[in-house]
Image (cartoon, grey):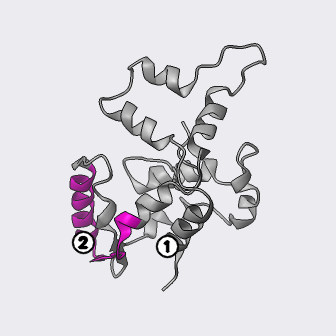
């Protein structure tokens, strides 16, 4: 399922760095169904998995943005897991430091509405993928009525697919989130 194409990015998840690197080696590059990747092939040189045998975290600096560890859902499992990973980084010789962005939560919430209707349009394109003109395609509203999602997710999806900021409000939101110091 697509996320908001203007605010979200997805990627592989795995048990270890090598598995992620191998997955990225297989999926990196342009995708004819994703216009944002049109010149991705020009940025690839070599393999992400190559060189991991001799890789080390010793002496590396890793910035951590704890402000997003507990997201809008309030779930703490991700935060707990990230704290465990930070300890592993430190044990492997990395220097871990906190990174903060002033007013990040407000900027993030403002930017969530930076593409009115984009999430709904992306989901409808996904749900209708491969359908013929006379096929009955399920809508997001119909999908939500099935009550097959985790508790609380239906309301979150309804909120995320609402029409949001546009026009001057959109420009102000984008300017705030992308402002360079």
Quarter of the image with the N terminus in it? top right
Query: Front-most of 121 and 80?
Result: 121
Q: Which residue is mark 1?
A: 176
Secondary structure, mark 1, is helix
Vertical comparison of 179 with 81: above or below: below
Magenta stretch: residue 99 in it? yes
Does 181 sit above or below residue 127? below
Residue 161, image x, y percentages: 51, 40
Callout 2: SS: helix
* Mark linked to residue 90: 2
Task: Depth check: give the residue in front, 95 or 112.
Answer: 112
Q: Nearer the viewer, residue 65 or 107?
A: 107
Q: Residue 102: percent from the left, percent from the top? A: 35, 76
Of mark 2 and mark 1, the one earlier in the sequence is 2
Mark closer to the observer (2, 1): 1
Q: Of the numbered discs in the image, which one, if any, rests on residue 151?
A: none
Q: Please give the name of the residue rendered at 38% of the width and 26% of the height, measured from the top-left corner.
A: 149
Report the magenta residues as a range: 78-106
Task: Give the camera-side residue of 55 and 94.
Answer: 94
The residue positioned farthest toward the bottom in the image shown:
181
Q: CA distance from mark 2 to mark 1?
A: 34 Å
Q: Residue at x 22, y 50 (%)?
A: 76
- Tell how many labels: 2
Q: Quadrant of residue 99?
A: bottom left
Where is residue 96 drawn, in percent x and y? 28, 75
* Whether label 2 touches label 1, CB < 8 Å: no
Q: Is residue 74 left or right of residue 15?
A: left
Residue at the image point whose x is 72% and y is 47% from the top: 31
């Amino acid at each position: 399922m697509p996320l908001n194409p203007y605010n979200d990015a997805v990627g592989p998840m795995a048990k270890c760095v090598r598995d992620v690197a191998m997955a990225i080696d297989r999926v990196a590059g342009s995708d004819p169904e994703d216009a944002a990747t049109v010149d991705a092939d020009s940025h690839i040189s070599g393999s992400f998995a190559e060189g991991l045998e001799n890789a080390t975290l010793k002496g590396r600096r890793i910035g951590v943005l704890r402000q997003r560890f507990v997201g809008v859902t309030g779930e703490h499992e991700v935060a707990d897991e990230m704290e465990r990973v930070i300890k592993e980084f430190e044990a492997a010789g990395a220097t871990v430091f906190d990174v903060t962005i002033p007013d990040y939560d407000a900027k993030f919430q403002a930017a969530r509405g930076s593409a009115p209707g984009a999430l709904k349009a992306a989901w409808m394109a996904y749900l209708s993928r491969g359908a013929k003109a006379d096929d009955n395609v399920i809508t997001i509203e119909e999908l939500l009525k099935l009550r097959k999602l985790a508790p609380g997710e239906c309301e979150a999806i309804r909120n995320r697919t609402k029409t949001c900021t546009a026009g001057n409000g959109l420009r102000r939101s984008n300017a705030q989130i992308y402002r360079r110091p």
